[in-house]
Image: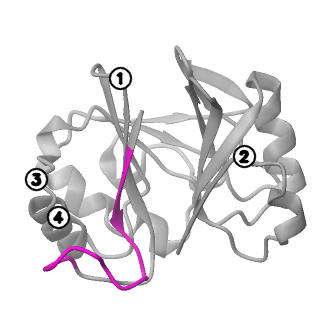
Amino acid sequence: MKITIIYDNMPPLKKGLQADWGFAALVEAGRERKILFDTGANGEILLSNMGILGIEPTSIDEVFISHPHLDHVGGLPRFLDQNNAVKVWVPPSMGEGIYEKETAVVQGPIQIHKGIYSTGELEGIEQSMAVETSSGLVLVVGCSHPRMKNILGSASQFGKVYGIVGGLHSTSPESLKDLGLICAAH
């Protein structure tokens, strides 16, 4: 598994990347699956950063939206202009048929592919993705609006959680103490 942070409000490490409030990451689960996790707030910035990182929009198989806040879904219409063939996984709070695109509404914790899971929408606001690795599950989160206890609890039904990547709003350090990998963003 490989995760590339495409969109973040932190100052970028690579020259030319633009920082902006929001989050998006490319999750590559093996050679067969490329999933864009969230799309940031601005589609032009998303696509520009993807270009600088050498990520072709048409190479993306699916989009996974964590929650309907603009800083996580604002870039979706512009991305869909470049690749409308993707499947879009959304939580129920997002609704069906967004941006004239058929969506897969995730109703609860599920396996969406071999070794890739959704926690389901927690506390009526956000879902997270869990990906199996040789070290355990790595969670990709948008903001962590649901309490971390709930996110980790839902993900743990699929295996032992090893790490977390993404936004950790209001997350207490104690809730992350048993993790081997923490990559805080947004």
For the record, the magenta segment spans: 3-17
Please say if the residues under marks 1 and 4 sit with CB atoms less than 8 Å apart. Answer: no
Q: How is the image coloured?
A: one colour
Please say if the residues under marks 2 and 3 sit with CB atoms less than 8 Å apart. Answer: no
Residue tagged 1:
30
Q: Residues within 10 Å of mark 1 (few under 14, many from 20)?
A: few
* Kind of residue at disc 1: Gly
Q: Which mark is residue 121?
A: 2
* Kind of residue at disc 4: Leu
Q: Residue 162: where, in percent of width, then height?
A: 69, 39
Residue tagged 4:
47
- Mark nearest the camera among 1 and 4 is 1
Closer to the chain start, of discs 4 and 3, is: 4
Closer to the chain start, of discs 2 and 1, is: 1
Q: Residue 55: where, in percent of width, then height?
A: 15, 50
Disc 2 to disc 3, how far (Cα)? Answer: 31 Å
Q: Considering depth in this image, is 78 or 154 the residue closer to the camera? A: 154
